[in-house]
Amino acid sequence: MLKPPDQDEYDPYFSIYINLIPDRDIIQFLQAQRSRIHDYFGGLSEEHGELRYAPGKWKMKEILAHISDSERVMCYWMLSIARGDSTKLAGYDQDVFVNRGSFSVCTFKELVADFQAVRQATLSLLPTISEKAWLRAGIAVNKEVTARTLLYVIAGHAEHHLNAILSR
């Protein structure tokens, strides 16, 4: 079982996501989270997809698409670091990704299926990463981080957005 990252494996900024993950099997958590996201977003109507939970916030469809896009990016960072690539990994502008995505023309069903595919790709990558590789460190967004930290950040980022929606 993969253990949570130690605090010396990441910049304190990542704590906002890592601290959202309970101390349990991260793979089981990712699978359960996939089901929770599917059940929540899959149960929303197309009209709900165009709603914002607060003024100035993204539409529900945009939030789901952002979760998927972010997981894609962070999974690449995780893969790159785990494989020992020493390239400094650039960040991305989440607002540009959301603003230039064609999410309004997608149905919720399509966006939920996209998230499911992204999460399945993440899960299918995990067995190819050795115990030693999980502890490799690299630079992502100008911060030193280990591969396993990024897996926890992926889960915590999705949890952060899900919690924000469910609390409103």
Image (cartoon, rainbow, N blue to C red):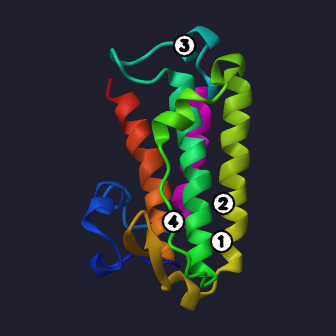
Q: Which residue is mark 3?
A: 50
Above or below for 85 versus 75: below
Amino acid type at mark 3? Glu
Q: Which residues are magenta?
A: 27-41
Cα distance in 3D space between marks 3 and 2: 28 Å
Q: Secondary structure at mark 4?
A: helix
Residue drawn 67% across the image and 62% down it: 123
Instruction: Reply yes or no: does residue 12 show up in magenta.
Output: no
Front residue of 113/69: it is 69
Cβ–Cβ under 8 Å for marks 1 and 3: no
Q: Earlier in the sequence, mark 2 or mark 4?
A: 2
Amino acid type at mark 2? Thr
Amino acid type at mark 1? Leu
Cβ–Cβ under 8 Å for marks 1 and 4: yes
Front residue of 130/91: it is 91
Cβ–Cβ under 8 Å for marks 2 and 1: yes
Instruction: Reply yes or no: does residue 39 show up in magenta.
Output: yes
Question: Which label was assigned to residue 151?
Answer: 4
Q: Which residue is mark 1?
A: 126
Q: Which residue is mark 2?
A: 122
Q: Residues within 10 Å of mark 1 (few under 14, many from 20)?
A: some
Residue 106, percent across and down?
A: 71, 22
Cα distance in 3D space between marks 3 and 4: 30 Å
Q: How many marks?
A: 4
Cβ–Cβ under 8 Å for marks 3 and 2: no
Cα distance in 3D space between marks 1 and 4: 9 Å
Above or below for 77 versus 165: below
Residue 33, percent across and down?
A: 54, 48
Residue drawn 45% across the image and 74% down it: 139
